[in-house]
Amino acid sequence: MENEKLSGLPAVRKFIVLVVQGAIIGAGAILPGISGGVLCVAFGIYQPMMAILAKPFKNIPRYWRMFIPILIGWIAGFMGLAKVIADLLSVNSAVITSLFIGLIAGTFPSLFKEGAKNGRTKGMWAALVISTLALLTFFYVLKFSSQTTVTPSFGWFVFCGALWGISLIVPGMSSSSVLLMLGLYQPMSAGIASLDMAVVGPFAIGIIGTVVLLARLVNGLFDKHYGIAFYCVIGFVIASTIPIIPLSFTGVGEALICVAAAGAGFAGSLLMDRWSAKHPPKEQENAEAVEKTE
């Protein structure tokens, strides 16, 4: 009986770690500038998620044990912690944002290590630089471009769905910013809230079609060019983190608190990452075993 309890203990801890990671992703979803895709990459969930979206029948049996605790944590984080974080943001957004920046930065060592597990090449570094500069340029153009509004229509609501689909697949992409700039965010959100099928229908077509097509493309890139694809995604994460770094503070005290919050997030992320590395989920071990035999 004691052996059974001891052997079951790591599984319980793995479950708790995955729930905590899911809660952080769910809670971070409301933070301005932080995308769920970035946090999924940070916690090593992004690639399995793409695999499931691309080939659900093949990959759900591999990863379902991983995603159940993550989903539980996400719901708890979004529904429970989101209100707390929203209140904290209203008090001091710089400190909370710094905490999440630390959480993301703390995963960079393992991300670079994972991406280079088959060796590093010049192409990987090129992918990292190009993806980082491309997304930073996109953010710059979006920030300084003039306001352009369009007339809502079936085609534009399909575009809204497609843009949301892209933001789910590409870490760091902000669909809300683009839709606000085009004047489509309010009519889209109002239509979805009221279940207006003239909005929901084309929106669903856009998001489902884009997710299915892009997930297959991303999954294919990981299969054929793992290192380049992974470093490209790291570039997206870096580019989406840089613009949200707090640069103005009310005083030295707030600046020091932000540094401490970032440090705490960094340390916490490293601890979770080291634990996950020592005790990977069973489906991850199975997937790696399958990859070695293929």
Image: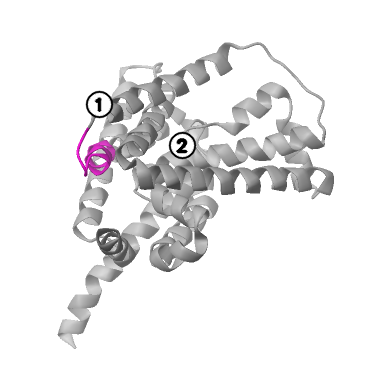
Based on the displayed image, in which of its 4 quarters is residue 117 positioned? top left
Q: Residue at x 51, y 61 (%)?
A: 56
Q: Which disc number belongs to residue 122?
A: 1
Relative depth, front residue between 24 and 147? 147
Q: Amino acid at mark 2?
A: Pro
Q: Check disc 1 and give the amino acid type.
A: Lys
**Image quadrant for the N terminus?**
bottom left
User: With 85 as the anchor, is 182 left or right in this view?
Assistant: right
Q: How many marks?
A: 2
Residue at x-position 56% and y-position 37%: 166
The residue that mark 2 highlights is 171
Q: Which residues are magenta?
A: 106-120
> In this orientation, which residue lies closer to the viewer: 14 or 168?
168
Say above or below: 205 vs 68.
above
Query: Which is more toward the observer, 28 or 230?
Result: 230
Q: Is residue 85 visible?
A: no
Residue 9 in sight in this render: yes
Q: Nearer the viewer, mark 1 or mark 2?
A: 1
Q: Is 112 colored magenta in this rendering?
A: yes
| Mark 2, other Cα within 10 Å: few <14 / some 14–19 / many ≥20 | many
